[in-house]
Amino acid sequence: MEEQVKNPIVDEQEEYFINMGPQHPSTHGVLRLVVSLKGEIVKNVEPHIGYIHRGIEKMCESITYPQIIHLTDRMDYLSAHMNNEVVCLAVEKALEVEIPDRIKVIRTIMSELSRIQSHQLFWASYGMDMGGQTCFFYGLRDREMILDIFEETTGGRMIVSYNCPGGLMYDIHPNFQKRVKDFIKYFRKVLPEYDAILTGNVIFRERSLGIGTLSLEDAISFGVTGPSGRASGFSCDVRKHEPYSAYDRVKFNEVLYTEGDTYHRYLARVEEMRESMNIIDQLIDNIPEGPYAVKMKPVIKVPEGEYFQRVETARGELGMFLISDGNKNPYRVKFRSPNFSNLGVLNQITKDFKIADLVAIAGSLDFVIPDIDR
Amino acid sequence: MLLDIAANSISSLKEPWWKFIYDFSVLTEAIDKSLKGSMSPFWVTVTEMVIIGIVFLLFYAVIGLFLVYAERKVCAFIQNRLGPNRIGPYGIFQTIADLVKLLFKELIPIKNADNFLFNLAPYIVIIVNFMTIAAIPFGAGMLAIDFNIGIFYIMAVSSMSVVGVLLAGWSSNSKYSLIGAMRSGAQIVSYELSVGLALVTIVILAGSMQLSVIVESQRDGWFIFKGHISAVIAFVIYLIAGTAETNRGPFDLAEAESELTAGYHTEYSGIRFAFFYLAEYINMFVIASIAATLFLGGWMPFHVGNWEGFNRIMDFIPPIVWYFGKTFFVIWIMMLYKWTFPRLRIDQLLTLEWKYLLPINLVNVLIMALLVLMGWHF
């Protein structure tokens, strides 16, 4: 244990280090950051991960394909629906199943709802990281409405397990369309409130503008995707570049900024909530009729080969690499999780900022720790 | 014997007994007189001190508990919540239940902590707090000590609370506590200047440092109206600097929850933690009541020039109501912005003080001096 605590990078004369985490309010989970400080100035950040490693990839090798989605739910629990989608899309691609439009549209709507609720929680906890505790309650108040919609249709609130290879678990609830429309109407009215309390606040802008700037080169070389990468100008939206489900039939903008600082990472997420609402608006009124699931074989056996599928979760690009030997369970599964890559850039962009900025920067990268460890 | 004294003092009241709500000295003088009738002067002083001490202790606890409850209700109101609502009607006994819980909690010993200083720190904070309350005039004739340098005394005493905070941070043997304490040290020492200069502005206008005289000279108009531009600027600066001095949001860097978990009192538990918690609220009360006394007329009712009837109606409201009304109004403002704004960073905090507030304040003092010199105030 002693060697682990000792940090070789610390200059004993000038610097000292503190452990942020595994139990710390601003690491949003069991992430441990060993921070070398000189006074209040951060000199080095070393993330220690693995506190919530459950071996999901290994567990996938011993269970069947429909069972995998219940594990991927627990990776990035805030975009559980998108995590499931990557498994379903990979399996469907391997089996060359034609998916009806109804399923595609419902999947897209659910994905965008997940994205909104994830960004709402980001907004809430980011306000809290900055010291504005009221934001947390405002964000959660509105997120609750989406969770209620999820609960009605899927039975789950956060861990929805709604996708399954070949379609959906059940059809949507009769109230679904009406409630989603009500929510969009309500949330369009509430979103300016978010801007009023945080985006336009002078203290907030002072604290986030120009802090933790991530250059485009760094974003690409570290593989920082999602809103964090797009704030640096890295056009990496899988929904645009490699459309899946119903994304090829909707019009939306990829939110891109060039500044790449904490403020624009935050702004990218707030703008994405608007874009997501636009996407839902285009789809919600014309969900095609049809079956909610394709009839699949009772035991799904993926033909031998290697498959790769990627989707855009709320945090970035999630990739699934699947090797099958033709059995009912995969030979090897590897997830390329967005948070793991995003975490790598933390040391790069927090250097020589204050400890309060470290919290802001880590918050703006929007970590979900189970997704880092898997 | 106590009953005798009480009976004596009531019978020796010159005016009807309920008059004391307008002038408290009626009651205090009666008690003083009846005590003098039965004791030697030395014991009279001792008894009076003990009575005042007990009254202040009770007041301290009650106001602390009430403020904690009030803050929880106000922040619940801002955050779309109900707040405490289980214990008693509207949850008014919630804080008492919390206090009982904290009293019974274990005091966790800290390894390698400097135990003497660790135990001493919360008491320093509490005692300093207690000393500031002594000089505040709560109503007509209702103050413990009437120094001729009252403001100077309050400034001197209240700036001592940083010692308790620094000791707490240093002796905890925790890096989070140390960072919090050092931040708090830098913050309180810096903002002490702004608080002082804002008060000096009013002292120039009042021409006295004695709190009772300051309140008395606001009989025909509160200083915030009398000193117009200059007094308003001083009031705003005082509110900002005062909030910073109490370590409350948006200046709560010393206990920045998301960075330092709880700052200088991270390692404290049980009743010692409660002391720090209570001290923060009493500190806020003191800051608000000084603001009310110096800028908003203290216990003085709202008077307008020569509107006799209006002034008489205002006089009908007891001074103690005026005093608490104004104080809680200031506290309410402080709570509102605590729950609205995000937290500043340490360098921004010091920039705000040394580059903005201090120069504005210095100019403001000159303006006030000019106003007084030329007689341009009301």
Image: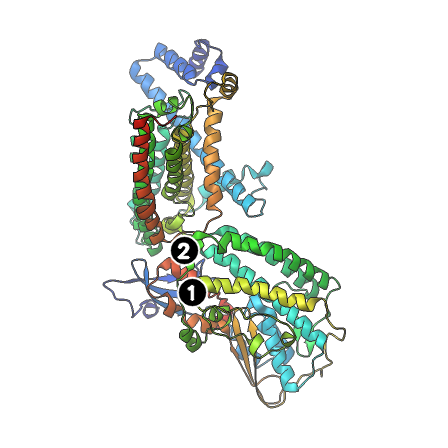
Q: Are marks 2 and 1 in contact (CB under 8 Å)?
A: no
- Find numbered disc 1 in the image and state the secondary structure of the residue it sits on: loop
Residue drawn at (32%, 68%) of the image: A2
The quarter of the image holding the N terminus of chain A is bottom left
In depth, the one of B302 and A297 nearer the eye is B302
- Report x, y in % for residue B164: 32, 42
Q: Chain of mark 1?
A: A
Name the residue furthest left.
A13
State whether residue B225 is above or below residue A223: above
User: Identity of the amino acid at label 1?
Assistant: Asp
- Report x, y in % for residue A288: 74, 73
Circle 1 Cα neighbour tier, 10 Å, few/some/many (<14 / 14–19 / ≥20): many
User: Identity of the amino acid at label 2?
Assistant: Glu
Quadrant in which residue B364 is drawn: top left
Residue located beneath label 2 in the image: A206
- Report x, y in % for residue A68: 60, 77
Residue drawn at (43%, 9%) of the image: B12
State whether residue A254 is above or below residue A139: below
Q: CA distance from mark 2 to mark 1?
A: 12 Å
- Report x, y in % for residue A222: 42, 76
Q: Which badge, 2 or 1, is on the more N-terminal residue?
A: 2
